[in-house]
């Protein structure tokens, strides 16, 4: 497991990456599209992340840049969780 993000995030992300081998490590900068995340998968991932982390990803963060890599997506989720706990 990658130490940049939580196990919950990685498990959720893996559920939406059909081209990722089960034993493969998720590299922080890999393109999520290269792992099979398409537009429909992105919507499903968005909903599951919001429910799992009890956050709402704001419209300005709903961009191809946010969903480009695991790291860019985790950075947004992590920031929202931290803001919520203040």
Image: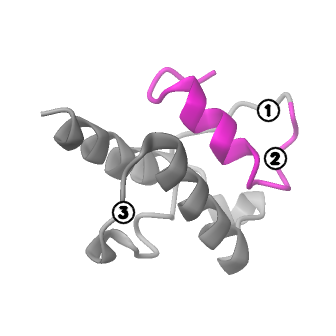
Residue 8 is one of the magenta-drawn residues? yes
What residue is pinned by disc 3?
A: 57
Residue 71 magenta-highlighted: no
Q: Out of 25 and 10, give the one closest to the viewer.
A: 10
Residue drawn at the location 41% of the way across and 64% of the way down: 66
Left or right relative to 51: residue 44: right
Q: Identify the residue shown where x is 38% and y is 47%.
A: 77
Under circle 2, the secondary element is loop
Looking at the picture, how far across and down is residue 17, in whole percent? 76, 54
* 13 relative to 2 in the view: left or right: right
The residue identified by callout 1 is: 24
Q: Are marks 3 and 2 in contact (CB under 8 Å)?
A: no
Left-right relation of 49 to 22: left
The overriding secondary structure of the stretch rendered in magenta is loop
Vertical arrangement, residue 42 with respect to residue 76, above or below: below
Magenta segment range?
1-22
- Comparing labels 1 and 3, the label whose residue is closer to the camera: 3
Relative to 60, residue 74 above or below: above
C-alpha distance separating marks 3 and 2:
25 Å
Q: Are marks 2 and 1 in contact (CB under 8 Å)?
A: yes
Query: Where in the figure is residue 27, as x and y percent of width and height?
Result: 60, 38
Whether 49 is drawn above or below 32: the answer is above
Can residue 31 be seen by looking at this rendering?
Answer: no
Viewer-nearest of labels 3 and 2?
A: 3
Query: In front here: 83 or 3?
Result: 83
Sequence-wise, which precedes: disc 1 or disc 3? 1
> For the C terminus, which image quadrant?
top left
Q: Position of residue 2 (x, y in %)?
A: 56, 24
Residue for badge 2: 20
Secondary element under disc 3, as helix, strand or loop, is loop
Cα separation between marks 1 and 3 = 27 Å
In the picture, residue 22 is in which quadrant?
top right
């Amino acid at each position: 497991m990658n130490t940049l993000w939580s196990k919950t995030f990685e498990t959720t992300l893996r559920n939406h990456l059909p081209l990722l081998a089960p034993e493969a490590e998720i590299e922080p900068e890999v393109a999520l599209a290269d792992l099979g995340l398409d537009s429909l998968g992105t919507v499903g991932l968005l909903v599951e992340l919001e429910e799992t982390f009890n956050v709402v990803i704001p419209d300005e963060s709903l961009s191809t840049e946010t969903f480009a890599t695991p790291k860019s997506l985790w950075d947004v989720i992590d920031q929202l969780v931290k803001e919520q706990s203040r």
